[in-house]
Image (cartoon, coloured by chain):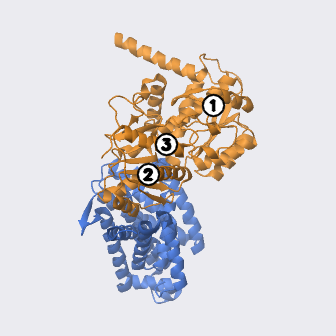
Amino acid sequence: MPGLNLVEQSLITGFLAGSLYGLLALGLSLSWGLLKLVNIGHFAMALLSAYLTWYFGTELGIPAWWAGAIIVPVFFVYGVALHWVFVKFRVSEMASMLITFALAIIVESFIQTIWTADFRRYSTPLADQSFMLGGLYVPKLNLLACLVAALLAVGTWGWLKFTYAGKALRACAEDAPIASAYGIDHKSLTYLLSGICAAYAGVAGVFIALIGTLAPNEIWTWIGVVFAVVIIGRLGNPVGALLGGILIGVCEALTQSAVNPAWAPLVSFSVLILLLLVKPKWI
Amino acid sequence: MTRIFTRLLGRAAVAASITMLLAGGAAFAQSGKPIVIGQTLALTGPLGQTGMVHKIVGEIVMDDLNKAGGLLGRPVEWKLYDDESKGSTARTQYERLITIDKVDLILGPYATEGILAAMTVAQRYKKLYIQNTLGIPHLATYEGQFSALMTGAEPQNTFPVRVLQAYADSGFTPKSIAIVTSKFASAQFNSKGMEALANARKIPNLYLEYDFGTRDFGAIAARVKDFNPDFIWTGVLGVEGHQILEAYGKLNYKPKAHLYLYPSPSLAQVPGAEGGISQTSLEDQPPYTNDPLIKHYAEAFHEKAVKANLPYPFIDSQAGNSFSGWQILIAAVKGANSLDDAKLIAWLEKNEVTTVMGKRDFKGKFHTNSVDATQIRQVQNGKWVLVWPRERALPQSKLVANK
């Protein structure tokens, strides 16, 4: 039986790991829920951002925060361009999944060609630093990622809930032709949102670079769990994505500490199936 | 003047060694149809980083072999496919190598799953099958299979004993052991051996398994820290060693003594890896590099690895296994003076071969070395250093246990 301290430590670890899931799920959830585009390439772009952060830091001496300041706007432009392609070719929800799957493979091959299949680690002074909180260790970088995820999730939620653009986007997601009939500039707003989703992949990538170890195939290790997070958190709901991520992260960590670490990968889908069976209001 | 002469003499010795070992002592003029050797490697996918080590080794061997006159007086070509770290792809590619490309010889791929998958193809066509990284020897039941590893037939029983013996020789006896292992077949298999030994010696132990591809090791690290063992046996593959060490670091936990079963070589450069041990058979340092051939391989590997942007551009045990596989194949062809698989198999069954990892036979079960000759290395000042057995290690290189 695990001790109380172990359980508490696992709760913190799971909470922070889950917030990274949430950060990664944020752009995917918005894209899927509000643009009706299932962007598997989101994972690939997050990893590309991570590699760029690592490259800027280790090869060019550009600190991660400045790297983020370069990557995020570039990714925003990429998101807009990607959406232009989707609009131009009238890509459907299902087709978007296939196209972005291909895109993810291309990005993976690109990363592997440029930086090889070997893993990369961005060592910074903060990487292993933690502070004590009532006898428990809280990793500083993970906490920072959690705070940024919370800021983005709540900020995006507020933007969607209280601003004209946000309300218009939600209206378009409900019924685009009717929303257009009421004078909403549907097209411009979707370009903006697509850019934001890609920018969020850029932000997630910066933290992946700082917290984790990079390998080109890592794209595929995220997909299952983050898809579960997106569905649990409800499509198009930024705060839901964050809370879904935290729920999965905590469940995984508790499974690892109290039962068997090998069972952790089963957790995300077990929780998803359980919630789909119970059907709580928020899903 | 003396220095120039010594340097020239050294270079001549290297050239002679390469010629002796690869061309059997005489440089032939190459003529005729090339001999084609087929192989797949995990060049992409989760094992891609280690597959690259084997690719570089293959390129070096090819260069040297052809410079030294090829095999049986014929030039040699290496037909390499990417098996994408998947057994199913390896199986298909070996079928293609044998039936469509009609290669003369084959060499096994990297990693357990691919090795076992490709072995079924080799068995069907009765090809000589030399593999260099199968961690579960008893699964290699094909009589035409030969292992390049120095682990013996039962590494799950012998290696844990050697590890505890190495610590005992340095005056350290762990009184509790945490065994943390990937469920990857060979890692799990050998880690079960450590668990069995701990139970047999009545050493309290904690056994934890995780799935291949686990992303976050925070909770596992917390559990290990909570157990606070004297020694941690970590059945990792590649990057997992780094991830576990980072997770320890975040909990401000420093293992007292720790082992990494199949780590990526660059683990040595990770903060927190200091004092960690692993198995080895070759490193880019004396006493290994006192051998002129190994020194040449080390330099050639370093040059190519830097160009390929490998984070740890030095030969190590992984490269050693790969060189060894090639050397066994070449020795068999030269010894049997034939490309006939049945003759090559018969020759290897009766003879010993000298490889970069030492002289070895195939008299153990499943054509393994008759004894477990695995050595132990330790991370000291950010580099892997051979520390055990004592008679093999340099006098100043001693296993240090953080008691």
- Mark sitting on residue A181: none
Question: SS for tag 1?
Answer: helix
Proximity of marks 3 and 1: CB atoms separated by less than 8 Å:
no
- Mark sitting on residue B329: 1
| Residue shown at 52% from the left, 17% from the top | B16
| Residue shown at 63% from the left, 38% from the top | B365
The residue to which callout 2 is attached is B234
Within-10-Å neighbours for mark 1: few <14, some 14–19, many 20+: many
The chain letter corresponding to orange is B
Depth check: give the residue in front, A185 or B121.
Answer: B121
Disc 3 versus disc 1: distance between alpha carbons? 26 Å
The subunit letter for the residue under badge 1 reads: B
The subunit letter for the residue under badge 3 reads: B
Residue type at mark 1 is: Leu
Tell me the mark number nearer the camera, choosing from 2 and 1: 2
Question: SS for tag 3?
Answer: helix
- Mark sitting on residue B159: 3
